[in-house]
Image (cartoon, rainbow, N blue to C red):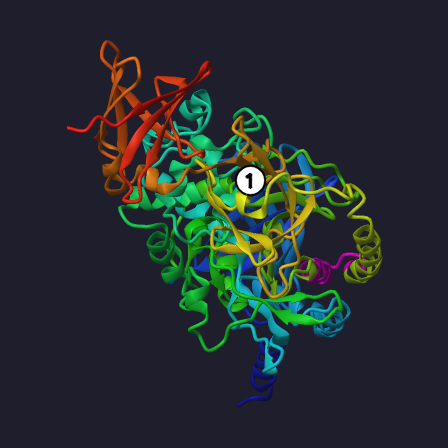
Amino acid sequence: MPAPARFLLFVLIALLLAAPALADVDGKWEGEIRIPGTALGLDVDFTTSEDGTLTGDLSIPVQNAFDMALADVVLEGTTIRFKLTGTQGDPHFEGQLSEDGSSIAGQFHQSGRTYSFKLLRAGDAVAKARDALAGLGEIVEKAITDMNVPGLAVAVVAGGEVAYAEGFGYRDVAGEKPMTPDTLFAIGSTTKAMTSTVLGMLVDEGKLVWDEPLQRYLPGFRLADPMITARITPRDLVTHRSGLPRHDLLWYNNNELTRAELVARFPYLELTADLREKFQYNNLMFMTAGYLAGELAGSSWEEVVQERLFTPLGMVRSNFSVDESQKDDDFALPYKENDDDELEVIPFRKIDAVGPAGSVNSTVHEMSRWLLFNLAAGKVGDRQLVSPSTLGEIQSPQMTTGATPERADVSVATYGMGWMIDTYRGHRRIAHGGGIDGFITSVMLFPDDGLGIVAFNNRGSGLPSLVSQTAADLVLGLPKEDWIGEAVEERKKGKEVREEAEKKKEATRIEGTSPSHPLADYAGTYVDPGYGTLEVSLAGEALEMRINGITAPLEHWHYDVWNGADAGDGDPTFEDQKLLFRGNVDGLIASVESIFEPRAAPIVFEKKPDPRLSDPEYLQGFLGTFKTATDTQVTIALSGSRLTATIPGQPTYTLVPQLSGRFALEELSIVTLGFELDETGKATKVLLYQPSGVFEAPRVEE
């Protein structure tokens, strides 16, 4: 080859070797447009077709705008240009790909204005998050010691992937079984967003309309106020604005009633606000929302969530009952901290009946899938499980909470549908906490940042949200804030304050008083149509109460007031609960009242008469004809389980059993009837108690 030709060939080879590789922008990019005063989060997907044509779509989650098509996508060297279609103002981007291909930075133009933008490859967002979280483990290890928590698990998703998932401490302290990202926890009220989401899926299918009257779907639904009953909608169920306060002691530990039976109790529960007047957190309404989902789907809430969320998301170990969790090989035990700062295992609290409000059990690994699903606008893989617009509505403000701000850099939260929504240090946050005996949970989404965090621990402690905020600060590059250190100091001060307050808790007790009756007179069955049955019985030389399967010892406080005593190893739910017993005009203990719902009037449980007085077999001995000294004839008969009394010339009266053992006339309550019985239980005489005296009517033998 001639020398000039060889020289030209070498030059061409050198130029080819020195040229940069063909730029590749395929894949997912996340970033923001810097608008004055804020940052508008966005993500972009670029795809190169077989013929080399570039296409793409763009999402702006904060505006509920997802997968908007791009036009005129052109990549020339390291310069990329693309336009957004279907939007006014000719929005278009022009940016430069960095040398390492990890970022695109440039200018965004719309309506004659120009703003800077920057995008990062999603994979780089994951790497960035992992680097930022490198020291989180050390922080958490110290925190679980300082906060006296048995164990904690935390997971972080970023850039569409799980960036971090670790367990710390123990799921079982005595057994020295370590906490892992795969340890099952009771997730409590973070269940609520799942219930709202499956309702949203039914909205997408046209089976439900958020703002239609609820009675269209549940005709038997009733509240104490018929006007609220007629107006309440499915949206109201999941936004805590029904007018009903919590009334949690109706469902708490109540494993006897079905959801339909719980709903049937609602007309007897006091409302404390008009519909949509104020935010009142309410588990019963979320339970009703789940019940509604099951009814519309022709199955149950559990089956709906399993089919529509758990299965497609691959949440294979998540379940709906602590009974199921305990069959697993890796579950956390619930703990409490006793007065000596020692950790004690406590019983699992089964809340299956109110499940849609908080009975799901899961792991941080599986909850990561839930986070990614929400950050992907309701999409998993190629499947759109709920429409972006519906999920956006679920995650948008629906109700003000009435709270006051605690910090200037964290806004007051509003409530969506199963989510709290605020601005956290300049970043939009969608979050919810959960708590049930021995478990506290925290789920946080930062949708504009593609960031999600879930943290669980197995003791009643605020640590999960503190760890979540610490992780968020690290990933978002925010100035350091010692959330956990502040909480440790508050914990110390709080303990001192509680101990001082404990010493003064008897300040309202009146010494030297006695009950008005012998202890046995307080024993009996008391009933409220909303809250059900409360049993009071003798326990040696004291009284004890039982409701919803919870037995609580009672100590005499003063006069006819009793106080829930230290339950020892028992259930502490009713410790320091005051019960006031009241008498009737006959001098008998007739009712007991207690504040079961702090926002409502005391619940009054009426004492039930001797159950034999409604037993048809026992009442057979009361039947017959009786006659007064003035020849007034009284005929006693039986109608079902009720006695009736017939007096010539008067209507037939229905007899209503009384605590005294007598019967009131339902139609003329000022008159009561008593019976004298022989040793066989046969009535020998009727006694007619009237204001003017007591009239006797011996049996007339046939």
Name the amino acid, label 1. Answer: Arg
Residue 215 against residue 451 in the figure, above or below: above
Residue 575, horizontal then vertical, whole percent: 64, 53
Where disc 1 sits, the SS reads loop
Q: In the picture provided, is 300 more to the left or to the right than 136?
A: left
Q: Position of residue 108 (x, y in %)?
A: 64, 44
Q: Which residue is mark 1?
A: 246
Q: In the image, residue 334 lies at what x, y percent?
A: 58, 67
Q: Residue furthest top?
A: 649
258 vs 324, nearest the viewer: 258
Q: Is residue 99 visible?
A: no
Q: In front here: 58 or 683?
A: 683
Residue 194 within the segment the image draws in magenta: no
Taking the spot 83% from the left edge, 61% from the top edge, the residue there is 492
x then y, percent, for residue 298: 26, 46
Q: Classify residue 481 as left or right of residue 227.
A: right
Observer able to see residue 40: yes
Main secondary structure along the magenta-highlighted residues: helix
| Rendered image quadrant of residue 218 | top left
Which of the pair 223/627 is nearer the observer? 627
Q: Residue at x 80, y 62 (%)?
A: 488
Q: Which residues are magenta?
A: 466-483
Residue at 66% in and 72% down? 150
